[in-house]
Image (cartoon, rainbow, N blue to C red):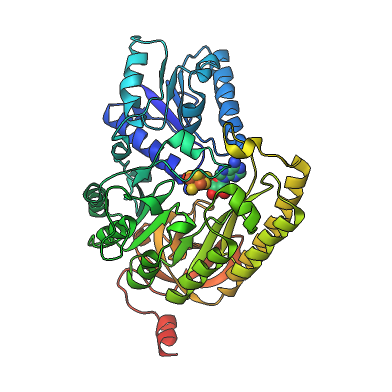
Amino acid sequence: MPQVFIKTYGCQMNERDSEAVAAQLAARGYTLAPDETSADVVLLNTCSVRDLAEQKALGKMSAIAGVARKQGRHPVLGFLGCMAQSRGEELVQSGARLVVGTQKFHRVGEHLDSLLHGRETHIVDTAEEAGSQAAIREHLPGPGGQRPVTAFVSIMQGCNQHCTFCIVPATRGLERSRTIPDIVAEVRELVDRGVREITLLGQIVTSFGKRDYPVKDGRSAFVQLIEAVHEVEGLQRLRFTSPHPKGYGADLIEAFGRLPKLVEHAHLPVQSGSNRILKEMHRGYTRERFLSLIEQLRQVQPGIAITTDIIVGFPGETEEDFEQTVSLCREVEFDQAYAFKYSQRRDTPAASMPGQLPESVIEERHARLLATINELASRKYAELVGSTVEILVEGPSRRNAARFEGRTRTNRIVIFEGDERHRGELLKIQVERAGAFTLYGIPVLTGIDDEPTPALTALSHS
Ligand code: SAH
Ligand code: F3S
């Protein structure tokens, strides 16, 4: 059976798409290879959001092609996803035999069959396909045959927002949503297989189902979906990403206070703290509106963790605009923030705006912003030392395979001495130490028989 290696660049949506492709290929009899060295097929699922992501994928593919050539091997090389969508045919010139766009992931299997049986020499399939948003559905069993504790469920594709810096509307197309019953059925199947935490995924999840489900009792389609998924028995935690701040209406904010499975974590990509830049970015909110959303979320859920995305060096960004971004970070005290250097993307309005900044200015501001973000976040992590947090145990730690890890509802990674018995358990952990965006601690419950240990008894009596 042909061996396939799939490597993913970019966001959780891309990870999810790759998983669905892998599950589809496994069902057709392909074997999934752990790396490219002996693979008959190498597929790179690409990202276009920043130029760096594209360069990484292109570099990797040419390195793989070079090594294979030296060894006299001729694997089928292919690009999937966002960069495949935007570059298309051009990738065939650089040696790819398969180029599959963002609405055609479900066709990878049949295309590979055609290539491997010699019916075609190369295939470029980047057309639109109605209904393709419902085709990202199949899941792989957990790593090493273990049951997966967390899973991602793709609820929609595309984005209509057209932020002036963003290539996503071009690579992913217009918003298209799955139906609520279809999504709930997928969640139910996953929970039956042992999954305890679901993350709903899409490029702009807060716009889910806008055209398909009218507002009902003041609740948007997205909140209707959250409520329907929340009903699934056995599900313990519900997350979503990526939302848009303008999608945090009164109904969604209220849901955070009302629905116990909805975790205390909200991601609100702010992009900039300057109203002038926000307007140029076509974000649809002001700094003041953003701050008021945070305040409302903290009112319904005082312990809520707030995370964000920020772009540094958007065209025309002055030192003063940048300072406003830094001051916004200090005002909000984000639990975590992802800071990106502005990258010019083809055919986006921002790419041809005046005032493009030199790389050196962007680098310098980026470093300053990172220092602020790290200072704020490490203070928050340090505050947790000595407290008891609840985690959902996911499996062996990605940083240290001898340990186990889980996450708090606020999405903080916690590492502890654990073993397979703990997988899927909700465990109380006494935090002993804080590292860079990681907590270390010891369980205060045995976790198997739920007998309180003396430590917890003392805690609950205090
Ligand atoms: N909602 C989308 C966001 C797109 S990309 C999603 O998660 O799919 C994620 C982040 O990348 C954005 O929030 C933004 O901060 C950053 N980004 C998007 N375009 C960018 C560009 N041209 N340069 C730098 N960063 C960018
Ligand atoms: Fe991109 Fe803005 Fe949509 S960042 S994905 S155009 S909300």
Q: Quadrant of residue 260?
A: bottom left
Q: Which of the two residues, 294 or 458, is positioned nearer the viewer here? A: 294
Residue at the location (59% across, 68% down)? Answer: 332
Establish if 302 lies above or below 357: below
State the residue at coordinates (43%, 36%).
Answer: 172
Q: Is residue 368 above or below residue 344?
A: below
The image quadrant that residue 108 belongs to is: top left
Quadrant holding ligand 1? top right
Q: Residue at x 55, y 73 (%)?
A: 384
Residue at horizontal 49 percent and vertical 14 percent from the top: 73
Rendered-image quadrant of the N terminus:
top left
In-front residue for pair 381/338: 338
Looking at the image, residue 357 sits to the left or right of residue 443; the answer is: right
Q: Quadrant of the C terminus?
A: bottom left
Image coords of residue 379 (percent x, y): 63, 70
Q: In front here: 160 or 112?
A: 160
Seen from the viewer's position, the closer of residues 430 and 284 is 284
Where is residue 247 shown, x and y percent of the image?
Answer: 43, 57
Where's residue 297, x and y in %?
Answer: 46, 70
- Residue 48, position in %: x, y? 54, 35
